[in-house]
Image: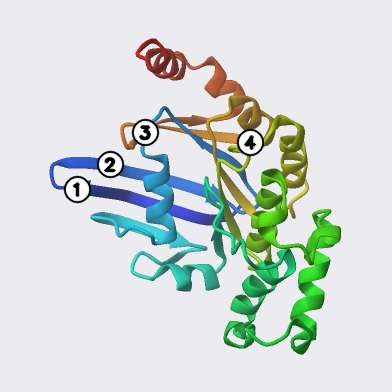
Amino acid sequence: MSVALETAGLCKTFGALTVANAIDFRLERGARHALIGPNGAGKTTFVNLVTGALSPSSGRILLEGDDVTALPQAQRVKRGLARTFQLNTLFRGLSVLENVCMAIGERLGVAGEMHRPAGSRRAVVDEGYHALERLGLAEDALRLVRELPYGRQRLVELAVALGLEPKVLLLDEPAAGVPSAESGIIVETIESLPAEIALLIIEHDMDLVFRLARRITVLVQGGVLVEGTPQEIAADPRVREVYLGEHAGR
């Protein structure tokens, strides 16, 4: 398999504090990969570096073999890198369909025209509606985001990310804050994502990790502790020590 996303010697320091320590990471095309670690391990920092929200102190980030280390976030998105957040970042005063259409318009280079009435961009609206249909959100298309239950809002955020047609999709705690009755829908939706998308899930819920991931990387104190299959990670005494140590210290 070819590599969709790769980091080489990725470091980030704030003064004397190192928050990312020479991270070498590879995400294969079509991967279902999870990034786990105790609180403060550097998971969100790593994602912020990969997406361009933070600039690394040293090291490289490659997207499908191209060095994107110096590119701004928007350019990385245009090259096929999308993410969701722990807390959704939707436009709550706009409709579900408008949120998705804005992402599609950005991808197609017509985002500046999306302030026009929805009907004026028929192709964008049609694509947006079909995206909502795939995620079971068509009935909510014209509802304001703020009117939806939180679990449905997380699905809308996923629809927005998919509207960018990503090659690499980073899901930051996709079921965080979602009631258990609705989290199953999110998991099923993730399981049904197109096989060609390389998926990296940053997650605390181990049940979710072991259900979705075929490979797992464990971060500790800003560096990679171990990487392997779910079975290898579950059996690794270093991983158990890290998590038991965290729990014991609470």
Gap between marks 4 and 3, in whole Å?
19 Å
Gap between marks 3 and 2, in whole Å?
8 Å
Which callout, 4 or 2, points at the residue further toward the start of the chain? 2
Secondary structure state at the residue bearing disc 1:
strand
Which callout, 3 or 2, points at the residue further toward the start of the chain? 2
Q: Can residue 196 be seen in this view?
A: no
Which callout, 4 or 1, points at the residue further toward the start of the chain? 1
- Position of 67 with respect to 182 (left or right) is left
Give the farthest residue toward the left.
Answer: 16
Gap between marks 4 and 2, in whole Å?
25 Å
Q: Give amino acid for label 4.
A: Ala
Gap between marks 2 and 1, in whole Å?
8 Å
| Residue shown at 45% from the left, 13% from the top | 237
- Position of 248 with respect to 12 (left or right) is right
Secondary structure state at the residue bearing disc 3:
loop
For label 3, the residue is 41
Q: Give amino acid for label 1.
A: Phe
Q: In this view, does 123 lie above or below 142?
A: below
Task: Assess disc 2: are there few (<14), some (14-19) or many (≥20) residues with their C-alpha within 10 Å of its C-alpha.
Answer: many
For label 1, the residue is 14
For label 2, the residue is 19
| Badge 2 vs badge 1, beta-carbon distance below 8 Å | yes
Find residue 19 and report its image quarter: top left
Gap between marks 4 and 1, in whole Å?
32 Å
For label 4, the residue is 213
Task: Assess disc 4: are there few (<14), some (14-19) or many (≥20) residues with their C-alpha within 10 Å of its C-alpha.
Answer: some
| Badge 1 vs badge 3, beta-carbon distance below 8 Å | no
- Position of 184 with respect to 218 (left or right) is right
Q: Where is residue 177 in the image (x, y as percent from the top left)?
A: 59, 37
Task: Assess disc 1: are there few (<14), some (14-19) or many (≥20) residues with their C-alpha within 10 Å of its C-alpha.
Answer: few
